[in-house]
Image (spheres, rainbow, N blue to C red):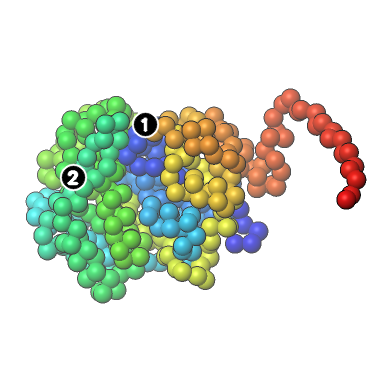
Amino acid sequence: MANQFVVAHIVPTGVKADIGGYVGDATPATNMIAAIADKVISHPNAVNGVAINLAKRNVLYVEGYLLDKFFKGDIELKEVERNKIGVILDNGMQKESYDLAMNTIEAMRTVGGIGISGVFRTGEGVDVRAVKTPNGSFVGEIGNEDALLDACELALRKGADALAISLKIKVSMHDLEEYFRGKGANPYGGAEAIISHLVTSRLGVPAAHAPLLSKYEIYKEMHSGRVDPRAAAEAIGPAYLGCVLQGLDRAPRPVASGGDLRVRDVDAIVLPYTCMGGVPALAAQKWGIPIIAVKENRTLMNATPENMRMRNVIVAENYWEVGGILAAMKEGFDPAQLRRPVRKMGILDFIAGRRH
Protein backbone atom coordinates (compact mmCIF):
# COMPACT_ATOMS: atom_id res chain seq x y z
CA MET A 1 0.00 0.00 0.00
CA ALA A 2 2.89 2.37 -0.80
CA ASN A 3 1.88 6.04 -0.88
CA GLN A 4 -1.61 5.26 0.42
CA PHE A 5 -3.03 6.71 3.63
CA VAL A 6 -4.77 3.92 5.59
CA VAL A 7 -6.96 4.47 8.66
CA ALA A 8 -8.90 2.04 10.86
CA HIS A 9 -12.20 3.18 12.39
CA ILE A 10 -13.42 0.96 15.23
CA VAL A 11 -16.44 1.24 17.55
CA PRO A 12 -16.82 -1.78 19.90
CA THR A 13 -20.28 -3.31 19.91
CA GLY A 14 -22.72 -3.69 22.80
CA VAL A 15 -21.16 -0.88 24.92
CA LYS A 16 -23.74 1.88 24.26
CA ALA A 17 -21.45 4.05 22.16
CA ASP A 18 -23.04 7.44 21.47
CA ILE A 19 -21.81 7.11 17.87
CA GLY A 20 -21.90 3.56 16.56
CA GLY A 21 -23.99 2.08 19.39
CA TYR A 22 -26.94 1.78 17.01
CA VAL A 23 -27.12 0.05 13.65
CA GLY A 24 -25.27 2.09 11.06
CA ASP A 25 -25.18 5.39 12.94
CA ALA A 26 -21.36 5.48 12.74
CA THR A 27 -21.58 5.45 8.92
CA PRO A 28 -21.31 9.28 8.51
CA ALA A 29 -18.18 9.32 10.70
CA THR A 30 -16.72 6.37 8.79
CA ASN A 31 -17.46 8.00 5.44
CA MET A 32 -15.94 11.30 6.61
CA ILE A 33 -12.74 9.40 7.39
CA ALA A 34 -13.01 7.64 4.01
CA ALA A 35 -13.17 11.04 2.28
CA ILE A 36 -9.69 11.78 3.68
CA ALA A 37 -8.05 8.34 3.69
CA ASP A 38 -7.31 6.19 0.68
CA LYS A 39 -8.51 3.09 2.55
CA VAL A 40 -10.54 2.72 5.75
CA ILE A 41 -10.59 -0.56 7.64
CA SER A 42 -13.83 -0.84 9.59
CA HIS A 43 -16.22 -3.54 10.76
CA PRO A 44 -19.90 -4.53 10.55
CA ASN A 45 -20.92 -2.77 13.78
CA ALA A 46 -19.83 0.60 12.41
CA VAL A 47 -21.68 0.55 9.08
CA ASN A 48 -24.51 -2.03 9.20
CA GLY A 49 -27.80 -0.16 8.77
CA VAL A 50 -30.53 -2.85 8.75
CA ALA A 51 -31.61 -2.95 5.08
CA ILE A 52 -28.87 -0.58 3.90
CA ASN A 53 -25.11 -0.28 4.03
CA LEU A 54 -24.04 3.18 2.86
CA ALA A 55 -20.31 2.87 3.52
CA LYS A 56 -18.12 4.36 0.79
CA ARG A 57 -16.42 2.02 -1.65
CA ASN A 58 -12.98 2.47 -0.05
CA VAL A 59 -14.25 1.19 3.33
CA LEU A 60 -13.07 -2.39 3.93
CA TYR A 61 -15.66 -4.48 5.82
CA VAL A 62 -13.75 -6.72 8.27
CA GLU A 63 -15.35 -8.86 11.01
CA GLY A 64 -14.10 -8.25 14.56
CA TYR A 65 -12.15 -11.49 15.08
CA LEU A 66 -10.35 -11.06 11.75
CA LEU A 67 -9.74 -7.43 12.67
CA ASP A 68 -7.97 -8.57 15.85
CA LYS A 69 -5.92 -11.14 13.90
CA PHE A 70 -4.95 -8.44 11.42
CA PHE A 71 -3.74 -6.08 14.15
CA LYS A 72 -1.77 -8.87 15.82
CA GLY A 73 0.03 -9.32 12.49
CA ASP A 74 -1.26 -12.89 12.03
CA ILE A 75 -3.08 -12.24 8.73
CA GLU A 76 -3.12 -9.81 5.83
CA LEU A 77 -6.16 -8.58 3.89
CA LYS A 78 -6.72 -9.40 0.23
CA GLU A 79 -9.16 -7.14 -1.58
CA VAL A 80 -11.70 -8.71 -3.96
CA GLU A 81 -14.13 -7.46 -6.56
CA ARG A 82 -16.91 -9.84 -5.53
CA ASN A 83 -17.61 -12.62 -3.02
CA LYS A 84 -20.10 -15.44 -3.44
CA ILE A 85 -22.14 -15.33 -0.23
CA GLY A 86 -23.67 -18.32 1.52
CA VAL A 87 -26.61 -17.43 3.79
CA ILE A 88 -27.25 -19.40 7.00
CA LEU A 89 -30.73 -19.23 8.58
CA ASP A 90 -31.71 -20.54 12.02
CA ASN A 91 -34.01 -23.54 12.20
CA GLY A 92 -37.40 -23.59 13.90
CA MET A 93 -38.55 -20.04 13.13
CA GLN A 94 -42.01 -18.96 11.97
CA LYS A 95 -42.91 -18.62 8.30
CA GLU A 96 -42.98 -14.81 8.60
CA SER A 97 -39.31 -14.83 9.68
CA TYR A 98 -38.18 -16.84 6.67
CA ASP A 99 -40.35 -14.83 4.28
CA LEU A 100 -38.72 -11.60 5.44
CA ALA A 101 -35.24 -13.13 5.16
CA MET A 102 -35.84 -14.57 1.68
CA ASN A 103 -37.43 -11.36 0.37
CA THR A 104 -34.38 -9.46 1.63
CA ILE A 105 -32.03 -11.90 -0.10
CA GLU A 106 -33.98 -11.69 -3.37
CA ALA A 107 -34.02 -7.88 -3.20
CA MET A 108 -30.24 -7.76 -2.75
CA ARG A 109 -29.82 -10.12 -5.72
CA THR A 110 -32.16 -8.34 -8.11
CA VAL A 111 -31.56 -4.71 -7.08
CA GLY A 112 -28.01 -4.85 -5.72
CA GLY A 113 -26.61 -7.51 -8.06
CA ILE A 114 -25.14 -9.38 -5.09
CA GLY A 115 -24.06 -12.96 -5.72
CA ILE A 116 -25.69 -15.55 -3.43
CA SER A 117 -24.21 -19.05 -3.67
CA GLY A 118 -27.03 -20.63 -1.65
CA VAL A 119 -29.33 -20.40 1.37
CA PHE A 120 -28.90 -23.03 4.10
CA ARG A 121 -30.97 -23.76 7.20
CA THR A 122 -29.34 -25.19 10.32
CA GLY A 123 -30.29 -28.77 11.21
CA GLU A 124 -31.41 -27.63 14.67
CA GLY A 125 -32.02 -24.34 16.42
CA VAL A 126 -28.75 -22.66 17.45
CA ASP A 127 -30.19 -21.27 20.73
CA VAL A 128 -28.49 -17.86 21.07
CA ARG A 129 -29.28 -15.50 23.93
CA ALA A 130 -28.21 -11.98 24.83
CA VAL A 131 -26.70 -11.58 28.31
CA LYS A 132 -26.65 -8.22 30.09
CA THR A 133 -23.58 -7.48 32.20
CA PRO A 134 -23.62 -5.54 35.50
CA ASN A 135 -22.41 -2.35 33.77
CA GLY A 136 -25.25 -2.47 31.21
CA SER A 137 -23.27 -3.75 28.22
CA PHE A 138 -24.23 -6.99 26.42
CA VAL A 139 -22.46 -10.24 25.62
CA GLY A 140 -23.93 -13.46 24.24
CA GLU A 141 -24.19 -17.23 24.71
CA ILE A 142 -24.52 -19.93 22.04
CA GLY A 143 -26.22 -23.15 23.09
CA ASN A 144 -25.70 -25.28 19.95
CA GLU A 145 -22.63 -24.10 18.06
CA ASP A 146 -22.30 -27.42 16.16
CA ALA A 147 -25.59 -26.80 14.35
CA LEU A 148 -24.28 -23.44 13.16
CA LEU A 149 -20.83 -24.67 12.14
CA ASP A 150 -22.24 -27.68 10.25
CA ALA A 151 -24.42 -25.39 8.11
CA CYS A 152 -21.51 -23.01 7.52
CA GLU A 153 -19.22 -25.83 6.41
CA LEU A 154 -21.89 -27.05 3.98
CA ALA A 155 -22.19 -23.55 2.52
CA LEU A 156 -18.41 -23.41 1.99
CA ARG A 157 -18.42 -26.82 0.28
CA LYS A 158 -21.13 -25.48 -2.04
CA GLY A 159 -18.88 -22.63 -3.17
CA ALA A 160 -19.37 -19.74 -0.72
CA ASP A 161 -16.49 -17.27 -0.20
CA ALA A 162 -18.22 -15.43 2.67
CA LEU A 163 -21.01 -16.23 5.13
CA ALA A 164 -24.05 -14.14 6.07
CA ILE A 165 -25.57 -15.63 9.23
CA SER A 166 -29.05 -14.88 10.52
CA LEU A 167 -30.01 -16.46 13.82
CA LYS A 168 -32.71 -15.95 16.41
CA ILE A 169 -31.28 -14.09 19.43
CA LYS A 170 -33.34 -14.23 22.61
CA VAL A 171 -33.50 -10.75 24.10
CA SER A 172 -35.53 -9.11 26.82
CA MET A 173 -38.31 -6.96 25.39
CA HIS A 174 -37.61 -4.47 28.17
CA ASP A 175 -33.97 -4.17 27.08
CA LEU A 176 -35.06 -3.80 23.45
CA GLU A 177 -37.54 -1.04 24.33
CA GLU A 178 -34.87 0.77 26.40
CA TYR A 179 -32.55 0.60 23.40
CA PHE A 180 -35.18 2.10 21.08
CA ARG A 181 -35.65 4.96 23.53
CA GLY A 182 -31.91 5.65 23.54
CA LYS A 183 -31.58 4.53 27.17
CA GLY A 184 -29.66 1.27 26.79
CA ALA A 185 -27.05 -0.58 24.75
CA ASN A 186 -27.91 -2.67 21.69
CA PRO A 187 -29.04 -6.01 23.19
CA TYR A 188 -28.23 -7.90 19.97
CA GLY A 189 -24.69 -6.57 19.59
CA GLY A 190 -22.73 -8.72 22.04
CA ALA A 191 -24.34 -11.96 20.88
CA GLU A 192 -23.74 -11.04 17.23
CA ALA A 193 -20.05 -10.53 17.95
CA ILE A 194 -19.84 -13.97 19.59
CA ILE A 195 -21.52 -15.60 16.57
CA SER A 196 -19.29 -14.00 13.94
CA HIS A 197 -16.15 -14.53 16.06
CA LEU A 198 -16.97 -18.24 16.36
CA VAL A 199 -17.42 -18.70 12.62
CA THR A 200 -14.40 -16.70 11.48
CA SER A 201 -12.09 -18.25 14.09
CA ARG A 202 -13.09 -21.80 13.09
CA LEU A 203 -13.48 -21.36 9.33
CA GLY A 204 -11.25 -18.40 8.44
CA VAL A 205 -13.62 -16.67 6.01
CA PRO A 206 -15.39 -13.28 6.09
CA ALA A 207 -18.64 -13.56 8.06
CA ALA A 208 -21.20 -11.26 9.63
CA HIS A 209 -24.48 -11.72 11.49
CA ALA A 210 -27.97 -10.24 11.17
CA PRO A 211 -30.78 -11.02 13.68
CA LEU A 212 -33.57 -13.28 12.45
CA LEU A 213 -36.65 -11.81 14.08
CA SER A 214 -39.76 -13.61 15.25
CA LYS A 215 -43.20 -12.55 14.03
CA TYR A 216 -43.75 -10.73 17.34
CA GLU A 217 -40.40 -8.89 17.10
CA ILE A 218 -41.13 -7.85 13.52
CA TYR A 219 -44.46 -6.41 14.66
CA LYS A 220 -42.91 -4.66 17.66
CA GLU A 221 -40.20 -2.98 15.60
CA MET A 222 -42.62 -1.85 12.90
CA HIS A 223 -45.07 -0.47 15.50
CA SER A 224 -42.67 1.05 18.01
CA GLY A 225 -43.81 4.64 17.46
CA ARG A 226 -41.30 7.47 17.36
CA VAL A 227 -37.92 6.14 18.46
CA ASP A 228 -34.49 7.59 19.15
CA PRO A 229 -33.24 8.92 15.76
CA ARG A 230 -30.31 6.51 15.89
CA ALA A 231 -32.74 3.56 16.05
CA ALA A 232 -34.94 4.80 13.21
CA ALA A 233 -33.40 2.47 10.62
CA GLU A 234 -34.70 -0.51 12.58
CA ALA A 235 -38.16 0.97 13.15
CA ILE A 236 -38.82 1.41 9.41
CA GLY A 237 -37.88 -2.09 8.33
CA PRO A 238 -36.33 -5.04 10.20
CA ALA A 239 -34.70 -6.61 7.12
CA TYR A 240 -31.31 -6.89 8.82
CA LEU A 241 -29.77 -9.22 6.25
CA GLY A 242 -29.67 -6.43 3.67
CA CYS A 243 -26.76 -4.50 5.17
CA VAL A 244 -24.77 -7.67 5.86
CA LEU A 245 -25.09 -8.91 2.28
CA GLN A 246 -23.98 -5.52 0.96
CA GLY A 247 -21.02 -5.48 3.32
CA LEU A 248 -19.87 -9.02 2.56
CA ASP A 249 -20.22 -8.50 -1.19
CA ARG A 250 -16.70 -6.99 -1.38
CA ALA A 251 -15.31 -7.86 2.06
CA PRO A 252 -11.55 -8.55 1.91
CA ARG A 253 -10.40 -12.10 2.51
CA PRO A 254 -7.85 -13.05 5.17
CA VAL A 255 -4.59 -14.51 3.82
CA ALA A 256 -1.39 -15.59 5.54
CA SER A 257 0.80 -13.58 3.15
CA GLY A 258 0.65 -11.81 -0.18
CA GLY A 259 -2.29 -9.61 0.80
CA ASP A 260 -2.94 -6.05 -0.31
CA LEU A 261 -2.89 -4.68 3.24
CA ARG A 262 -0.69 -5.45 6.28
CA VAL A 263 -0.87 -4.04 9.79
CA ARG A 264 2.28 -1.99 9.13
CA ASP A 265 0.38 -0.17 6.37
CA VAL A 266 -2.04 1.38 8.90
CA ASP A 267 -1.31 5.06 9.55
CA ALA A 268 -3.85 5.70 12.33
CA ILE A 269 -6.64 4.06 14.36
CA VAL A 270 -9.75 6.02 15.42
CA LEU A 271 -11.47 4.74 18.60
CA PRO A 272 -13.83 6.00 21.31
CA TYR A 273 -11.84 7.61 24.14
CA THR A 274 -12.99 5.02 26.70
CA CYS A 275 -12.31 1.92 24.56
CA MET A 276 -8.53 1.47 24.69
CA GLY A 277 -8.62 -2.07 26.08
CA GLY A 278 -9.16 -4.05 22.87
CA VAL A 279 -6.63 -5.79 20.64
CA PRO A 280 -6.37 -2.97 18.04
CA ALA A 281 -5.49 -0.35 20.67
CA LEU A 282 -3.00 -2.64 22.43
CA ALA A 283 -1.45 -3.73 19.13
CA ALA A 284 -1.05 -0.08 18.13
CA GLN A 285 1.48 0.26 20.96
CA LYS A 286 3.51 -2.62 19.56
CA TRP A 287 3.46 -1.38 15.96
CA GLY A 288 3.78 2.32 16.74
CA ILE A 289 0.44 3.25 15.15
CA PRO A 290 -1.04 6.58 16.36
CA ILE A 291 -4.44 6.30 18.04
CA ILE A 292 -6.99 9.11 17.77
CA ALA A 293 -9.27 8.88 20.84
CA VAL A 294 -12.67 10.56 20.35
CA LYS A 295 -14.02 12.00 23.62
CA GLU A 296 -17.50 12.84 22.34
CA ASN A 297 -18.14 9.18 21.54
CA ARG A 298 -19.00 8.13 25.10
CA THR A 299 -19.50 4.44 26.03
CA LEU A 300 -20.15 2.32 29.12
CA MET A 301 -16.45 1.41 29.27
CA ASN A 302 -13.70 3.17 31.21
CA ALA A 303 -10.56 1.99 29.40
CA THR A 304 -9.19 5.50 28.83
CA PRO A 305 -5.67 6.24 27.53
CA GLU A 306 -4.69 7.31 31.04
CA ASN A 307 -6.07 4.17 32.71
CA MET A 308 -4.40 1.95 30.10
CA ARG A 309 -1.15 3.98 30.21
CA MET A 310 -1.25 4.36 26.46
CA ARG A 311 1.45 6.10 24.48
CA ASN A 312 1.06 7.63 21.05
CA VAL A 313 -2.53 8.82 21.61
CA ILE A 314 -3.98 12.00 20.14
CA VAL A 315 -7.16 13.12 21.90
CA ALA A 316 -9.92 14.59 19.71
CA GLU A 317 -13.00 16.20 21.25
CA ASN A 318 -15.22 15.10 18.36
CA TYR A 319 -15.18 13.72 14.82
CA TRP A 320 -14.80 17.23 13.39
CA GLU A 321 -11.41 17.34 15.06
CA VAL A 322 -10.65 13.82 13.84
CA GLY A 323 -11.05 15.07 10.28
CA GLY A 324 -8.52 17.87 10.81
CA ILE A 325 -6.03 15.59 12.55
CA LEU A 326 -6.21 13.00 9.77
CA ALA A 327 -5.90 15.64 7.04
CA ALA A 328 -2.72 16.93 8.73
CA MET A 329 -1.32 13.42 9.11
CA LYS A 330 -2.02 12.64 5.46
CA GLU A 331 -0.04 15.74 4.45
CA GLY A 332 2.84 14.54 6.62
CA PHE A 333 3.02 17.20 9.33
CA ASP A 334 2.41 17.17 13.06
CA PRO A 335 -1.27 18.01 13.80
CA ALA A 336 -0.11 19.88 16.91
CA GLN A 337 1.26 22.60 14.62
CA LEU A 338 -2.35 23.60 13.91
CA ARG A 339 -2.85 24.63 17.55
CA ARG A 340 -2.02 27.90 19.29
CA PRO A 341 -0.14 29.14 21.20
CA VAL A 342 3.11 27.71 19.81
CA ARG A 343 5.55 26.89 22.58
CA LYS A 344 9.14 27.99 22.20
CA MET A 345 11.66 25.19 22.03
CA GLY A 346 14.41 25.10 24.64
CA ILE A 347 18.10 24.45 24.08
CA LEU A 348 19.86 21.56 25.75
CA ASP A 349 23.49 22.25 26.60
CA PHE A 350 25.98 19.55 25.77
CA ILE A 351 28.82 19.15 28.21
CA ALA A 352 31.69 17.19 26.79
CA GLY A 353 33.21 14.66 29.15
CA ARG A 354 36.59 13.07 29.14
CA ARG A 355 37.03 9.80 27.33
CA HIS A 356 38.61 7.08 29.41
Tag 2–tag 1 contact (CB < 8 Å): no
User: In the rendered image of this protein, does residue 29 appear above or below residue 77?
Assistant: above
* 299 relative position to 96: left or right: right
* Residue position for label 1: 300
Q: Position of residue 113 (x, y in %)?
A: 35, 63
Asked whether residue 294 appears in the rendered view, the answer is no
* Residue position for label 2: 129
**Element type at mark 2:** strand
Residue plotted at (72% across, 26% down): 340
Neighbourhood count class around disc 2 (C-alpha, 10 Å): few under 14, some 14–19, many 20 upward: many
Q: Residue furthest front?
A: 356
Q: Position of residue 108 (x, y in %)?
A: 30, 58
Residue plotted at (26% across, 53% down): 195
* 145 relative position to 76: left or right: left
Q: Amino acid at mark 2?
A: Arg
Q: Position of residue 130 (x, y in %)?
A: 21, 42
